């Protein structure tokens, strides 16, 4: 989809549909809080006001009404979309409204769609991101496509805006493109996204974006002593890999920080010997969403070039229950030298992350952030709305939360008290890989903390947010691309 910015008056914009944003009529400034919306209403003979008066439209979020052949406009149609309360409206809301408008119009064969905005760089960026995210469909394997014309052009209309808005739109394309890249990886079925195939995609990405890429194979990991990662992988016919991708800025500030982004890459998780129930197991292809997110973030980092060095690590395995699979009760020795008793083979993500965190420290990373679909317990705690964030360092936690606010992602700080460590005791090894039923998301994070050691570290549990169980008005069902934008903003704002 082509992206354009048009700074002319809205009545001159030729398109199949011109979209304007309207708010709840009880909002401060009334429903027509934006000047550009009032202008569209006047050009259309007061049509939007009449909708409010007749109660056909109330301005609730994602509510729509459409006018064909509006007088006074070059557009073939005028679509008004609701945005809720104007005093609570954020750029994250605009991103969703933009995506919802595009998804509402896309099935109607409208090649050119325009969204009328105020002359604001924040609005243009959010609108472009939302449109690109809304246009994504994880339907690459459907042989029968809907007979509708795709959206060919999205126009961000910002009357009176500066020429610099074009640069804003290009930046938004990069950010949304990185998120959609992640979604494209996660949407692949496990037979088409094995650890080896993920490594191939990583190599191709690195070559395209000018990044360094190294892929550690099974023999190299065995030489290094990554017993936890290899233990998870031993039940699968697909060999594991550890993907290491590096970005180095032209000039780094002193003292030079080095950010490590680590993503869990279980390309399919059957649970191993502690096998999962059959119902919904097909979704376990998304257990590599953390790895996909760090690769997507590196795609945007390579193009936007922050001033901090960034290394991404993606340990990739399949967790399968063959005759070679690790068993409950097995004890593995991690790269750090610590031993782990495997109580439950379905608590595998923390095992592969343990070795990756240690290796990131060995590579010189001064700050660590991991993203993982780690626990069902975080879904019990926060549902499908918030990412749980755990951190060993207050300053890093605040950096991550600030980055999330700037990105429009929802993160919620979770506890990491030493009291929870009491649940991580084994009679036979240094640690068990589970801490029992209660506080499962916290004890999983406490386990990882052992391998971050003294290095400032944050953990994002994305189990409830990396996959949308149902389609949203603004996003297709399936992979969400969380937390690509947060990881990118963390690097850009350092």
Image: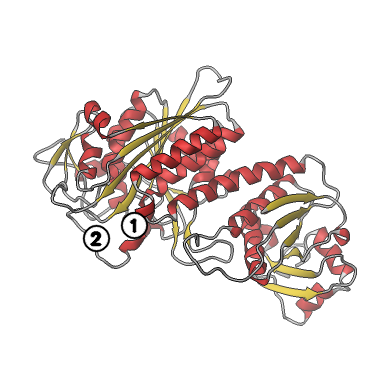
* Mark 1–mark 2 distance (CA, rounded to whole Å): 10 Å
Outermost residue, bottom side: 54
Task: Identify the residue at horizontal 26%, vertical 44% (top origin).
Answer: 420
Q: Is residue 447 above or below residue 48?
A: above
- Could you say which disc has been placed on residue 254 in the image? none
Q: Which mark is residue 276?
A: 2
Q: Quadrant of residue 334?
A: top left
Q: Position of residue 176 (x, y in %)?
A: 59, 48
Find residue 251 and report its horizontal and vertical position in percent. 58, 19
Q: Quadrant of residue 135?
A: bottom right
Please name whichever residue, 20 or 408, is drawn nearer the observer in this view of the structure: 20
Direction from residue 205 to residue 328 in the image, left or right: left
Query: Residue at 46% across / 33% down in the picture?
Result: 395
Q: Residues within 10 Å of mark 1 (few under 14, many from 20)?
A: some
Question: What kind of element bears circle 1?
Answer: helix
Residue located farthest toward the left when viewing the structure as drawn: 428
| Residue 377 falls in image quadrant | bottom left
Q: In this figure, which residue is indicated by the disc labeled 1?
A: 284
* Whether residue 50 is visible: yes
- How crowded pointer 2 is (Cα within 10 Å; few <14, some 14-19, many 20+) is rated as some
Label 1 or label 2, whichever comes before in sequence order:
2
Q: Identify the residue shown where x is 69% and y is 72%.
A: 64
- Secondary structure category for the residue under label 2: loop
In this image, 237 relative to 490: left or right?
left
Q: Quadrant of the C terminus?
A: top right
Residue at image coords 55%, 61%: 475
Q: Considering the image in quadrants, where does the N terminus appear?
A: bottom right
From the top left corner, tell me how far across and down residue 92 is, in percent.
Answer: 61, 53
Residues marked 1 and 2 touching at CB (< 8 Å)? yes
Q: Position of residue 437 (x, y in %)?
A: 23, 55
């Amino acid at each position: 989809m082509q992206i354009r910015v048009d700074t002319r008056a809205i009545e001159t914009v030729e398109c199949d549909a011109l979209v304007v944003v309207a708010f709840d009529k009880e909002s401060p400034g009334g429903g027509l809080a934006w000047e550009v919306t009032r202008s569209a209403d006047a050009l259309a003979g007061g049509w939007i006001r009449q909708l409010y008066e007749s109660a056909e439209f109330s301005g609730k979020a994602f509510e729509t009404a459409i006018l064909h052949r509006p007088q006074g406009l070059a557009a073939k149609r005028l679509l008004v979309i609701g945005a809720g309360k104007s005093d609570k409206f954020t750029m994250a809301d605009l991103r969703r409204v933009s995506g919802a408008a595009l998804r509402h119009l896309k099935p109607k064969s409208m090649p050119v769609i325009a969204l009328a905005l105020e002359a604001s760089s924040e609005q243009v960026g959010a609108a472009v991101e939302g449109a690109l995210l809304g246009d994504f469909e994880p339907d690459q394997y459907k042989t029968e496509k809907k007979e509708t014309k795709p959206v060919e052009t999205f126009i961000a209309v910002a009357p009176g805006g500066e020429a610099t808005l074009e640069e804003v739109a290009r930046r938004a394309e990069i950010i949304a493109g990185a998120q959609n890249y992640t979604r494209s990886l996660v949407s692949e079925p496990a037979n088409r996204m094995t650890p080896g195939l993920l490594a191939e995609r990583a190599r191709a990405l690195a070559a395209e974006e000018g990044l360094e890429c190294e892929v550690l194979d099974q023999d190299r990991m065995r030489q290094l002593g990554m017993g936890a990662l290899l233990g998870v992988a031993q039940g699968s016919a697909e060999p594991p890999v550890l993907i290491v991708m590096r970005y180095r800025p032209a000039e780094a500030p002193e003292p030079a920080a080095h950010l490590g982004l680590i993503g869990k890459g279980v390309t399919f998780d059957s649970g191993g010997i502690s096998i999962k129930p059959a119902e919904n197991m097909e979704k376990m292809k998304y257990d590599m969403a953390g790895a996909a997110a760090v690769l997507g973030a590196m795609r945007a980092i390579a193009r936007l070039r922050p001033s901090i060095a960034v290394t991404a690590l993606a340990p990739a395995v399949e967790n399968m229950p063959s005759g070679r699979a690790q068993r409950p009760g097995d004890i593995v020795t991690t790269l750090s030298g610590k031993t782990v008793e495997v109580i439950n083979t379905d608590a595998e993500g923390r095992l592969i992350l343990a070795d990756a965190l240690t290796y990131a420290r060995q590579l010189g990373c001064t700050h660590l952030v991991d993203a993982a679909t780690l626990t069902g317990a975080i879904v019990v705690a926060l549902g499908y709305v918030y990412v749980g964030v755990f951190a060993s360092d207050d300053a890093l936690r605040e950096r991550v939360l600030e980055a999330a606010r700037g990105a429009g992602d929802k993160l919620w700080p979770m506890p990491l008290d030493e009291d929870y460590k009491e649940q991580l005791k084994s009679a036979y090894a240094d640690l068990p890989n589970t801490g029992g039923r209660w506080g499962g998301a916290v004890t999983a994070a406490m386990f990882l903390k052992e391998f971050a050691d003294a290095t400032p570290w944050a953990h994002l549990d994305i189990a409830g947010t990396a996959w949308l169980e149902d389609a949203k008005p603004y996003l297709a069902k399936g992979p969400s691309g969380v937390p690509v934008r947060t990881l990118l903003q963390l690097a850009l704002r350092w």
